[in-house]
Amino acid sequence: MSDIELKVGPAPGGWALDCAAIQPTYFRSGGRAEAAARRLAIQLSSAGHDVRMVVRDSTEQMVATHLYFGG
């Protein structure tokens, strides 16, 4: 299957979860955006996709990268 990248980072008024496969989703807190991204990454990897999740802080610095392998 295909590789998918999930991006969590700051957005006007809050935080965004962005991915080419879905419409951007917005949250008031970074923690909620990251939790939603983890749930989505697990679902996508269960469907056979390799998923890379990138988390950025409020200054746009990358603070974490998580890999989920489909199978």
Image: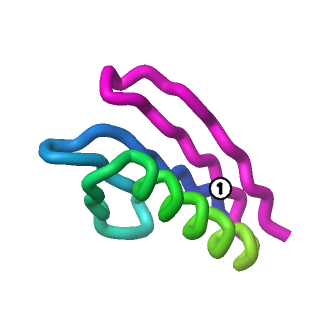
Closer to the camera, 69 or 3? 69
Q: Report the quarter where the C terminus lies.
A: bottom right
Percent position (x, y) of residue 4?
A: 57, 57
Name which residue lies at 63% across and 48% down. Answer: 52
Residue at position x 67%, y 43% in the image: 66
Q: Horizontal placement of 30 versus 10: left or right?
A: right
Residue plotted at (38% across, 46% down)? 30
Residue 27 is left or right of residue 4, and the answer is left
At mark 1, the secondary structure is strand
Per the rendered image, the range of residues in magenta is 49-71
Outermost residue to the right: 71
Residue 46 sits in which quadrant? bottom right
Q: Can see residue 9?
A: yes
Residue at 35% x, 25% y is 60
Relative vertical location of residue 63 with respect to residue 25 in this rendering, above or below = above
Location of the N terminus by quadrant is bottom right
Residue 32 percent coordinates (x, y): 42, 57
Q: Which residue is mark 1?
A: 51
Which residue is nearer to you in this view: 6 or 55? 55
The question of residue 28 being in magenta is answered with no
User: For this rendering, which residue is in front, 12 or 3?
Assistant: 12
- Front residue (pair 32, 25): 32
Amino acid type, label 1:
Val
Locate residue 43, reporting x and y percent.
64, 75
